[in-house]
Image (tube, rainbow, N blue to C red):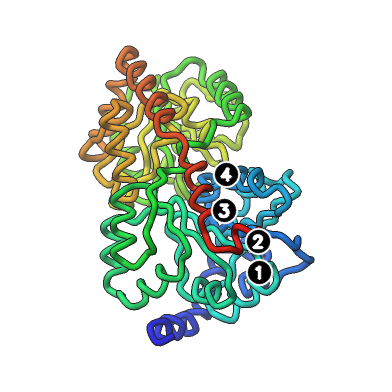
Amino acid sequence: MSARLPYTLLWILALPFVLLRLLWRARRQPDYLRHWGERFGSYAGKPPEKLIWVHAVSVGETRAAEPLLRALLAQWPDHGVLLTQMTPTGRETAEALFGKEPRVLLAYLPYDLGWLSARFLRHFRPRFGVIMETELWPNLLATCRRQGVPVALVNARLSERSARRYARLPALSELTLGALSAVAAQTEDDARRLNALGAPQPRVTGSIKFDITPPAAQLELARQFRSGFDQRPVLLAASTRDGEEALLLEAFKQHANTDVLLALVPRHPQRFDEVARLVQSRGLKLQRRSDNAPVAADTRVWLGDSMGEMFAYYAAADVALIGGSWLPFGGQNPIEACAVGTPVLLGPHTYNFLQVAEQAIAAGAAQRLPDAEGGVKEALALLGDPDRRARMAQAGAQFSLAHRGATARTVAVLKTMPAQVEQA
C-alpha cells in the first residue's frame, strides 16, 4: 500500500477538481452529465452471472477493441462482455458498434479509488478483465488482484517518452504492472519497455487494429461522399489536434488550387465548432458533414463533424495527412487509411505508433514529412500523380493484410491466464 498511498491521497485531493472539470466539459458535451453515478461505482440492474470485462478508455481504444471483443464472444459463447470507457465519445462509439449485441453491456469505469473499484467489481463480478493499450490504474489493478480477478493488458503499447515518465515512480509502476496476469504487447520494443518496468513476461502479439475490417456500410458511405464531391481531388486531414489545423489551413490556402477539397476531421468532437470558426477566419468557404448536402464547387473545406465515420473519410479521400503527427502529440495509427488503400503522409511526431509508422513507410504505403507545410505540398504533388498514388494504395493494402492475426494471438494469451479464465 505504501507506494500507492501518495497516489491515492492525490486522487482524493484532486477529486473535487475532476468533478469541476466534468461540469466544465459538459458545457460543450452534455453527455458528460449522463451516467454520473457509474463514475462512483453505482450501477443499475443485475449483470449476467458469467461476464468478461473489457476496458477501452475512449474512441480509439474502443474501435481497436472491436475484433477482440467479437472474438471473446465467440470463444466464450455462454458469457456476456462488459465494455467500459471513461469518455462519452468512447461510449457513443461502443453503442454504435455493439448497441445491437444483447451480450454486450456498457458502463463507465469508476475513478481510481480503491473503494470505488471494489464496488465496481462486487457489482459485475467479472471472471477476468482485459485492458486495452495503456490504461493502467494502480488502485483498480490492486483491487482486482485482492479480489482474485485476473487482468490482462492487451494491444499494449508504451512509447519511450511514456516509459521515462513511469520510471520516475519505479515502486508504483512495478506494483501496478506486477498486478497484471498477462501482457500482450504490440511490438518487441513495447514488450521490452513494459518488462523493464515490472510487467510479467510480455508476449508480442502485434496490433489488433490490423484485424479491423472496413465495414461495408462505411465503404458505401464513402461512395456517397465521393458522389457529392463532383470528382474533385480530396485531401483528408484526419484526427487533427489543437494547433495543427491552423498550420495545415495556412499551407492549404497558400499552395492548393481551388479545385482541391480539404476534408478536415478534428480528433475531438468538442472542437468541431472551434475549428469551423478557424476555417472561416482564413476566408475559406466551409461546409460541414452534418449539413448532409453535396459540396458546392466553391467550397474549399469540408468539416468532418461526425463520429464513427473515419473509415468512410479515409476511403473517400485521395491522400491522407495523419493528425497528431504535425505537432508533438505522438501521432495516430495509420492502419485504417492503409486498409482502404489511401496513401498516408505523416509528420515528424509519431512516437505513440513508431514501429507501425516505420513499417508503413518501409512498405511504401506512407511517407514522412518534416512539417505541416511540407505535408500539404507533398499531398498536392501526390494528387497530381495518379500512378504514384496507385502504388502507395496497393502497398498500403498489402501492408495491412500482411500484419493480420493479432486478435487470435491475443485470445491465445488470455487462455493462458490463471484458472479462473480457464474455468470461465
- Label 1 and label 3: CA atoms lie apart by 15 Å
- Residue placed under numbered mark 2 in the picture: 107
Residue 66 bears which disc, if any?
Answer: 4
Compared to 205, does 260 lie above or below? Answer: above
- Residue placed under numbered mark 1 in the picture: 38
- Residue placed under numbered mark 3 in the picture: 90
| CB under 8 Å between discs 3 and 4 | no
Observer-nearest of 193 and 298: 193
User: Earlier along the polypeptide chain: callout 1 or callout 4?
Assistant: 1
Q: What residue sits 27% from the left and 40% below the top? A: 347
The quarter of the rendered structure image containing the C terminus is bottom right
- Label 4 and label 2: CA atoms lie apart by 16 Å
Compared to 367, does 371 lie above or below? Answer: below
* Of marks 3 and 4, the one in the foreground: 4
Helix, strand or loop status at disc 3: helix
What amino acid does circle 2 point to?
A: Ala
Label 2 neighbour load within 10 Å: few <14, some 14-19, many 20+: some
Q: Residue furthest top?
A: 387
Helix, strand or loop status at disc 2: strand
Q: What residue sits 54% from the left and 65% below the top? A: 150
